Image (cartoon, rainbow, N blue to C red):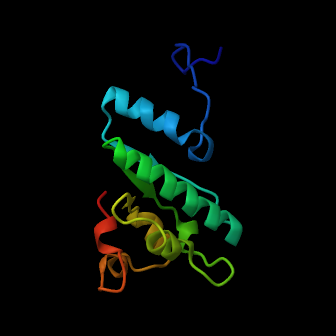
Amino acid sequence: MPATADGKPMVMPPMRNLGDNYQEIIDELAEVGLPYLVCANTPIETADEIKNSIAVLNKSSEAAKKAGIVMAYYNHDAEFKAVDGKVPCNLLLSETNADALKMELDLCRVIKAEVDPVDLFKGTSKNRFNNKFIL
């Protein structure tokens, strides 16, 4: 069994993903009363991966909302690099349900991607960006 630096045993739970295990994960969070589920990463290197990730995030966030859990997506700088001419962050913001999926904005990663974070908070009637950034 692996151990920490001070010799205590370290147990790593098996890694699960929302695509295969979203309901199980949400049920466990609800059982212990955790209010948030944050997705820290999703495949976004191709247009197909982005499309699939959006579908998984929509399905997962709707289930989380029904369970009384707020689901959010945590960004990295890769979400701001165009894939086939489209910026994954813009697709995540525009093609996910604003009432179910929120965003946790990492300003350092936004700046690393050379994006002005203030622009992400500016909303107009034609987009749903403003009410997504809650964390």
| Relative image position of residue 86 (x, y in whole percent) | 60, 81
x and y percent of residue 9 in the render? 55, 14
Q: Residue at x 46, y 66 (%)?
A: 96
- Between 29 and 107, the residue placed more toward the observer is 29
22 left or right, relative to 135: right
Does residue 113 appear anywhere in the picture?
A: no
| Of residues 90 and 63, the one drawn nearer to the viewer in this rendering | 63
- Total residue callouts: 0
Image quadrant in which the C terminus is located = bottom left
Does residue 23 sit above or below 111 in this rendering?
Answer: above
Q: Residue at x 57, y 38 (%)?
A: 21
The picture quadrant where one finds residue 121 is: bottom left
Identify the residue at image location x=47%, y=65%.
Answer: 109
**Quadrant in which residue 94 is drawn:** bottom left
Residue 48 seen anywhere in this rendered image of the structure: yes
- Describe residue 130's horizontal placement relative to residue 89 as left or right: left
Of residues 76 and 86, which is closer to you in this image? Answer: 86
Quarter of the rendering occupied by the N terminus: top right
Is 104 left, or right, of 47 in this rendering? left
Q: Give coordinates of residue 6: x percent, y percent.
A: 51, 16
52 lies above or below 82: above
Q: Residue furthest front?
A: 66
Image point 56% across, 45% down: which residue? 18
Q: Compared to 5, does 35 lie above or below?
A: below
